[in-house]
Image (cartoon, rainbow, N blue to C red):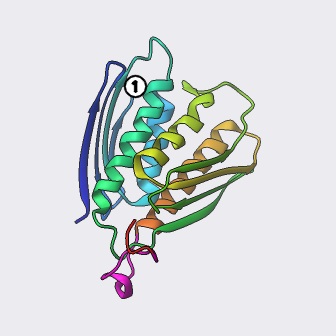
Amino acid sequence: MRKAKISRETKETRISVELNIDGKGKYSVDTEIGFFSHMLESFSKFSLFDTEIKVRGDLKVDQHHTIEDTGIVLGQALGKALGDKKGINRTGYFIYPMDESLAVVALDIGGRPYLQYDAKFGRRYCGDFDTDVLEDFFYGFSIGLGANVVVRMLYGRSDHHKIEAIFKAFGKAAKMACSTDKRAMEDVPSTKGMI
């Protein structure tokens, strides 16, 4: 089983992520930000990764450190669980429709972090979640995993639906990228011979 546990503690945040790539989408998530917890639960359900995520941060300041650091630790845990990355698809993408919204997320776990992000929201907050820091979450994830991450919100009306479509697409894209191909189990998916 491809599993990992990563804990990170700074003066701003305390974050623990336990992850099983070959799970069934079971989750236990507590971030103290209700909508963010719900989105991480959606990620787990749609990736089929089992996750235990506990986050404490300096929310009295704002949500930036908490959200970005959660992305970093989630990315680190996924990278550790992937091990030598032999046989993985490496890339994954998904186009997710949710009512009037349509989101696209693509990943390349190629060792080079980069974020392409284009999502706009009508409100600063969706529930108790600061939509301004969603980009920071995906930036942190790309750094933690060493992955190229593309997030596009093509259209939508409801900020709730738009963000949820993004996280469900994120889960599906991660599932595809981390899936293995028996024909390639002896090698990493790179002409360089390493990721």
Q: Is residue 184 located in the magenta-colored stretch of the structure? A: yes
Residue at position x 73%, y 38% from top?
A: 120
- The residue under the point 28% across, 58% down is 81
In the rendered image of this protein, does residue 53 appear above or below residue 152? above
Rendering coords of residue 11 (x, y %): 32, 18
In this rendering, would 180 be left or right of 166? left
Quarter of the N terminus within the rendering: bottom left
Left or right: 146, with 103 as reference point: left
Query: Which residue of the protein is positioned furthest toward the bottom in this rendering?
Result: 183
- Please say whether residue 23 is visible from this viewpoint: no
Describe the element under mark 1 as helix, strand or loop. Answer: loop
Q: Quadrant of the C terminus?
A: bottom left
**Residue 104 pos. (x, y %):** 65, 57
Residues in magenta?
179-191
Which residue is at the far front?
192
From the viewer's side, name the closer residue of 66 and 124: 66
Q: Which residue is mark 1?
A: 32
Q: Residues within 10 Å of mark 1 (few under 14, many from 20)?
A: some
The residue at 44%/53% (across/down) is 146
Residue 156 vs residue 64, the one in the foreground = 64
Q: Amino acid at mark 1?
A: Glu
